[in-house]
Amino acid sequence: MRFFRKSLTGLFLFGLTLGLLAWAGIMVRDAVQARMNEEPNRRPARERVFTVNTITVTPETITPVLSVFGEVQSARTLELRAAAGGPLRELDPAFVEGGRVTQGQLLGRIDPADAQAALDRVESDLLDAQAEGREAARAIDIARDELAAAEDQVMLREQALQRARDLLGRRVGTEASVETAELALSSARAAVLSERQALATAEARIDQARTAQRRAEIAREEAERRLADTEIRAAFDGVLTDVTVVSGRLVSANEQLAQLVDPSALEVAFRVSTGQYARLLDGAGDLRRAPVEVVMQSYDAQLTTTGQISRESASVGEGQTGRLLFATLDAPRGFKPGDFVTVRIQEPALDNVARLPATALGADGAVLALGAEDRLELVDVTLERRQGDDILVRAPRLTGRQVVAERTPLLGAGIKVQPFVPEGGEASAEPELLELSTERRAALVAFVQSNTRMPEAAKTRVLAQLQQDRVPADVVARLEGRMGG
């Protein structure tokens, strides 16, 4: 009986346990189904608003500045070469690298012994030629006198012949005397011809003496020139460079000894593209004498001067493009030939153009402008010039409107933004400050403290700003933008 009672008790407890397990399973199932069927309690999604730097488009008249690179060079450069060969006997102390010389200054002298000896010989030959000329002049005077005497003899013989014929006509003289007078006249005439031949010879001797004297003078001039070639003189005021000689050195003819550079006649040579060159032409197609600014920038100083475009190269040059232009410098103080400089050229002024940052223009040739409800819209513009980090655009539709100063891949048409005018724009120079409520300040502080990607230094700085009574508006906008609010 006891066994039967215990068996029934055990069956009862077993059945009760199974019932409790089944009831628990049903409760778990119902709870899971209820959890899966209920609506999630989520915060409504909020549109992300980006804070962007904006700039107001203000058309104006702007003079574009073309910036290129060039090299300073001297418009007057002379190679000093040895016109004669030989040892360099004399050398001026200023004949050194960087030495300043004046026009006509004797810089050096090549041994003039041979040239001086040649000049002495030529001068001796010239003296002989002059003596020969004087002797020929005396000889021609004597020849003229002898010719005059012979002509007088002819006149006397003619008179004697006439008297003999008169006597023969009066039958006082004889025919033999007439014949004798005729023979004497013939002899006198022959003497005249001989003297004329002697005079012609004397005149020819004069011409030969003059020719010999002229040859001697030419030889003397050539000898003097060769003697002058032994002197090395400065052709103009300037500075010496590339000096390669020392006193006593043996130089050869046409050897370059140095270069003479005029430091007051400097110019800059620079190359521009064909399009840039076309903008520098006037209505007649000639190159404008546009003003230029030349700047040489170094680590700790800057040299600046002004100038004017003077000419252009006649040809492009093999393997080159564009055009090579030259500009004279007004006051080239501190500049040296070979300096690498920046040349800024003023182009003709452009009307009704706006200056924008280069980052505002996209690859599609459009900018993002603020539209209704601070939403962005694409507006096409016409690019006129690029000026370093800025651009000059023509966009009549954007007059007075704000455009995004820095386009990013996250920005596009239709996106809502919060405009922010950077310092130096149309906004006040002082940053805008906001007074935050306790809840808004606490939310921002909690977001900064929980942000694991923010550097500790930046986090400390931002938290210090949030603890102030008035917080910069750009800081608040940036944090709320990251929070999604």
Image (cartoon, rainbow, N blue to C red):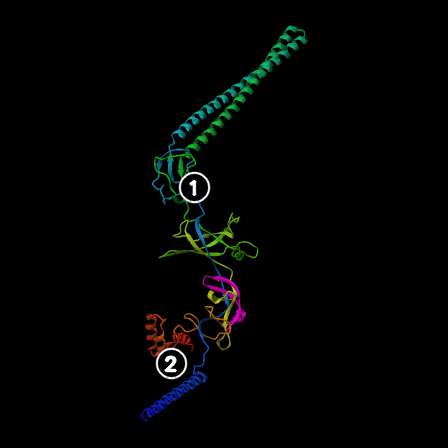
Name the residue located 46 percent from the left edge and 29 percent from the top edge: 219
What's the distance in space between the residues labelled 1 and 2, CA to CA?
A: 80 Å
Going by the numbered disc 1, the residue's amino acid type is Glu
| Residue 454 figure quarter | bottom left
SS class, disc 2: helix
Sequence order check, earlier mark of 1 and 2: 1
Name the residue located 51 percent from the left edge and 52 percent from the top edge: 323
Residue 93 appears in the rendering: yes
Describe residue 167's horizontal placement relative to residue 66 as left or right.
right
Query: Looking at the image, which residue sits at the far bottom?
Result: 1
220 drawn magenta? no
Q: Position of residue 456 (x, y in %)?
A: 33, 71
Front residue (pair 213, 83): 83
Q: Residues within 10 Å of mark 2 (few under 14, many from 20)?
A: few
Looking at the image, do the residues carrying marks 1 and 2 touch, with CB atoms under 8 Å apart?
A: no
Q: Position of residue 42 (x, y in %)?
A: 43, 82
Number of the label disc, if any, that sits on residue 214: none
Front residue (pair 455, 328): 455
| Between marks 1 and 2 in the image, the one whose residue lies nearer the viewer | 2
SS class, disc 1: strand
Q: Position of residue 262 (x, y in %)?
A: 42, 46
Asked if residue 399 is positioned above or below residue 240 in the image, the reply reads below
Asked if residue 112 is positioned above or below residue 451 in the image, the reply reads above
378 drawn magenta? yes
Going by the numbered disc 2, the residue's amino acid type is Arg
Query: Looking at the image, which residue sits at the far front?
Result: 1
The residue to which callout 1 is attached is 79
Q: Where does the magenta region start and end?
A: 376-400
The residue to which callout 2 is attached is 440
